[in-house]
Amino acid sequence: GTLVTAAEETATDEEHPPSGSAAGLRSGTGVSTTSTPAWEFKVKSGWEAFDHAAQGEIQRKYEEWKAGGTARTAVQAGGYEVSIYFDKMSSKTARGHPRAIRNTKMKE
């Protein structure tokens, strides 16, 4: 199936539970974040996926930003509060250094 891009998707995430199970990345063909994480952050050895619980929230916040919302947000991921900067496609924890982020399911 084909994923709906953030630009094509409408803001209907309020209809979905906040669990992140499939919220944010969905299409009429049943593609969801349960099979392959989409949002990743840069590490020395390559890329590492944000935890499953954060995937849907990051995608929802990204879509809100693309629709005119704020570029900076914070999510809980891996036991840390992570600041996400969509305009810079980067993330940062309170004690860490900035890391590049990407969505493997979108063409940027």
Image (cartoon, rainbow, N blue to C red):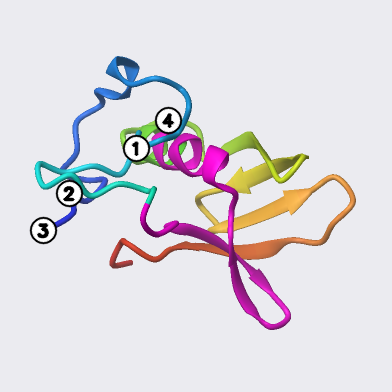
Sequence-wise first label, 3 or 4 = 3
What residue is rendered at 51% in x and 49% in y? 86
Amino acid beneath label 1: Ala
Where does residue 50 sit, x and y in percent of width and height? Answer: 59, 53
SS at badge 4? loop
Callouts 3 and 4 close, C-beta under 8 Å? no
Q: Residue furthest front?
A: 35
Task: Give the numbered dot on residue 88.
Answer: none
Where does residue 80 sit, x and y in percent of width and height? Answer: 77, 41
Q: Which residue is mark 1?
A: 22
Marks 3 and 2 sit apart, C-alpha to C-alpha, by: 10 Å
Q: Nearer the viewer, residue 95 or 85?
A: 95
Query: Could you tell whether 81 is left or right of 49 in the image?
Result: right
For the N terminus, give its image quadrant.
bottom left
Q: Which residue is mark 4?
A: 69
Q: Residue furthest bottom?
A: 45
Q: Nearer the viewer, residue 7 or 46?
A: 46
Amino acid beneath label 4: Gly
Q: Which residue is mark 3?
A: 1
Callouts 1 and 4 close, C-beta under 8 Å? no
Task: Give the numbered dot on residue 4.
Answer: 2
SS at badge 3? loop
Marks 4 and 2 sit apart, C-alpha to C-alpha, by: 19 Å
Sequence-wise first label, 2 or 1 = 2
